[in-house]
């Protein structure tokens, strides 16, 4: 009994081409997904967010020489660096720019007692534990994570804070740590012998590199 051929000879070629197209589409789709994940659209790196007051670190830090700790008072002792209350801002602005429309929300806050509702720029996911104080105590400078804040007329996120980015330091802290007295120096740049100096500081500060990549350090 003769059985009619269901598929013609070109079916094999079509099947092979379909597999190739599917593989290419899968690889391209994965590449696009990775690119999107790393893009500023998702990470928000380099994008200044709208704030109730267009606060300028450039003016306050570079222009007026205000130390990070004046506003971020708990950065050396707590997990959260702290957002300055209205009272801190009014230490100067009760005398300076008192009629400026740009900072009217500050005066409204002072008069009403309601805090200024700032928009978080750097916000880690809830499943990640981060403590500012331990990083400060181990010689990690503000600009290492937050970038050149003294050059920011409006504040933006300088790094992705992806786990892969954090692990660069956790795996090789000697590349990043600096003398503790220079942690708040926004002009600090790594010296030519950073690796040697950093290795010495890692030992001096009691940084246990073998523990820094344990999952429980950041995920508790």
Image: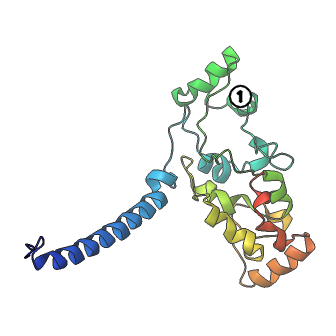
Q: Which residue is drawn at 69% across and 20% down?
A: 110
Q: Which residue is drawn at 85% across and 74% down?
A: 202
For label 1, the SS is helix
Residue 52 in the image: x percent, y percent? Answer: 55, 31
Question: Can you say whether 46 is above or below 176 in the image?
Answer: above
Question: Can you say whether 81 is above or below 97 in the image?
Answer: below
Residue 17 in the image: x percent, y percent? Answer: 21, 76
Residue 34 in the image: x percent, y percent? Answer: 45, 63
User: Residue at label 1?
Assistant: 86
Q: In which quarter of the image is residue 149?
A: bottom right
* Camera-side residue of 204 and 99: 204
Q: In this view, does 89 lie to the left or right of 134?
A: left
Q: Quadrant of residue 3?
A: bottom left
Q: In which quarter of the image is residue 98?
A: top right
Seen as rendered, the residue at the extreme top is 112
* Camera-side residue of 4 and 183: 4
Q: Does the image show residue 176? A: no
Question: Can you say whether 192 is above or below 97 in the image?
Answer: below
* Camera-side residue of 3 and 196: 3
């Amino acid at each position: 009994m003769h059985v009619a051929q269901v598929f013609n000879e070109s079916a094999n070629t079509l099947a092979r081409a379909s597999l190739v197209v599917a593989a290419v589409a899968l690889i391209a789709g994965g590449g696009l997904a990775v690119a999107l994940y790393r893009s500023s659209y998702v990470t928000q790196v380099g994008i200044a967010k709208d704030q109730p007051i267009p606060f300028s670190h450039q003016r306050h830090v570079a222009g007026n020489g205000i130390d990070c700790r004046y506003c971020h008072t708990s950065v050396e002792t707590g997990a959260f660096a702290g957002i300055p209350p209205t009272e801190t801002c009014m230490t100067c602005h009760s005398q300076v720019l008192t009629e400026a429309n740009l900072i009217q929300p500050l005066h409204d806050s002072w008069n009403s007692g309601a805090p200024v509702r700032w928009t978080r720029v750097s916000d880690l996911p809830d499943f990640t534990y981060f403590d500012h104080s331990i990083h400060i105590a181990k010689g990690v400078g503000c600009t290492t994570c937050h970038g050149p804040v003294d050059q920011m007329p409006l504040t933006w996120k300088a790094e992705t804070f992806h786990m892969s980015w954090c692990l660069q330091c956790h795996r090789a802290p000697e590349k990043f740590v600096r003398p503790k007295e220079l942690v708040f120096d926004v002009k600090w740049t790594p010296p030519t012998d950073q690796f040697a100096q950093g290795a010495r500081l890692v030992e001096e500060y009691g940084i246990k590199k073998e523990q820094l990549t344990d999952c429980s350090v950041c995920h508790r």
